[in-house]
Image: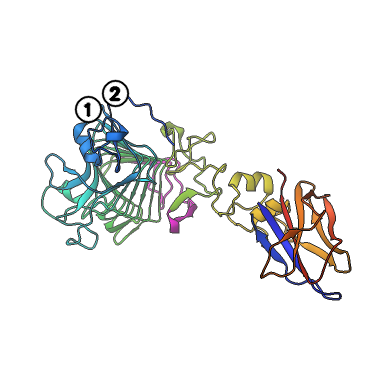
Amino acid sequence: MLLGVGVRWMRSGSHPVALVVMLMGCSVWSAAAQTLYVSTNSVLDGPGTAWSNAFHVIQNAVDAASGGYTILVTNGVYDVGGAVAPGQGLSSRVCIATNLSLVSVNGPEVTRIVGHYDDLGDLEGNGPYAVRGLYLVDGASVTGFTIEDGHTFISGGVWLDWAGGGVLFDGGGILRRCIIRDCSARFFGGGVEYDEGGRLESCLVVDNISAQGGGMDFSYGGEILNCTVSANHASQDGGGISCLYGGMVSNTIVWANTSDGANDNIDITGVGHSFDYACTTPDPGGTSNLTANPLFTNTGSENYRLLYSSPCIDRGTNVAALTADLDGTTRVINAVIDLGAYEYDGSWYDPDGDGLVDADELMVYGTSPTNSNTDGDPHNDYEEMIADTDGANSNDYFRITNATFASPVTIHFKSSSNRLYTMASRTNLVDGAWSNVLGDGPRVGIGGPDSMVDTNATPPAFYRLTVELLP
């Protein structure tokens, strides 16, 4: 990577003009005997005993599996197929009514279960032709999917047909490292409905809507551990979570949800619930809850990872500690688990997008992890790293300090003894290319006031000075 600055040399007596700045510069699974496979593009569609004959539809694999099976699903959009749970009327895109494990190979960003929006139903997509995202029972587990665009009936059937547009836990089940978004339910749990059990671990629940519990609804039980519930809406009460006699919430962020009725984030009815180590407002009561802004990276782009200054970092309880977060990052990084779906990891987070990870900005360069140009000078933090200048000092940046145009042409600058410098020239900026000046680099800087010389200069000419990292 190179950082360059340049001047134009006109005929004798002219002055340097325009400073030019340029920057150039899988998961492995051990498959047991009781494993089935799903892929959208395998050569054969079934019987699912290998990737070459993987089922194209998840539900077909579920129907072929027995209790104790594992179903591996590779990248794809799974928006066909489905089944109706026993005793209900609403179809679910994936309906798991036995104790099996459904696992995506590469995670929720590339593996999606998509329900169905009923164009003939209400404005949210609920209606007689709607399809829920996922149904599961006690003993079933699902890991690593995005579940989206699931919806419910408006009327008819049993009450569970109007609940849990994204996910319905019917008596139990576990959902790990999943994203539930853009789902709706006519009455209860736009994203998730718990009916007497079920558990969410390291999941993100966003942009869902329902009358009660836009994000989720607890009905006599259920747990949520290390999840983030945000930007959901209820047309009545409980934009984020609605609790009806039960529900355990731990290490979880419930923030910036809305409702047209009471309680934007959490609505509570009856007893049997618990809220511990939660970040929400107002405080619902419980142990070690926070009411401060969790400081998400960028909710506009649905990036709900924590900024380095978040009060939710190292604030959870390790009693409920999990092995991985939604990104697959190992939990716990420090001594105490973070709140929410994501464990803060400064070794690769770069929320300001400047190419420098938080850990390096804080510990090595002294720049801000949330501002790509900490000192506001002409070069951003990454360019200052390339130039070995101080990204927190607006007076210290790579530039030409002076130019002498009498033959020989001399370019003056401040150099670093840890960087390579090259001087190049060209006769115009429209045609031709830059040519390195003979004898002027690349060479290591002297570490202070420095200069490079063109002993064969022919006016008019433009000059460019570049800096790069040592090999």
| Residue stretch rendered in magenta on the structure | 273-302
Seen from this angle, which residue lies furthest top?
A: 33
Q: Position of residue 25 (x, y in %)?
A: 64, 54
- Residue at x 79%, y 49% (from the top left corner): 443
Question: What residue sits right under mark 2 in the picture?
Answer: 33
Please tell me how crowded label 2 is: few (under 14), some (14-19), or many (20+) other residues with Cα within 10 Å. few
* Mark drawn on residue 190: none
Question: What residue sits right under mark 1 in the picture?
Answer: 67
| Magenta stretch encompasses residue 301 | yes
Please tell me how crowded label 1 is: few (under 14), some (14-19), or many (20+) other residues with Cα within 10 Å. some
Report the amino acid beneath label 2.
Answer: Ala
Q: Position of residue 322 (x, y in %)?
A: 42, 34
Query: Can residue 4 be seen in the rendering of this structure?
Result: yes
- Judging depth in this view, the residue of 131 and 293 nearest the camera is 131
Q: Position of residue 123 (x, y in %)?
A: 23, 63
- Judging depth in this view, the residue of 275 and 356 nearest the camera is 356
Which corner quadrant holds the C terminus?
A: top right
In this image, 288 relative to 468: left or right? Answer: left
Place residue 458 in its image quadrant. Answer: bottom right
Cα separation, mark 2 vs mark 1, equals 13 Å
Which mark's residue is nearer the viewer, 2 or 1? 2
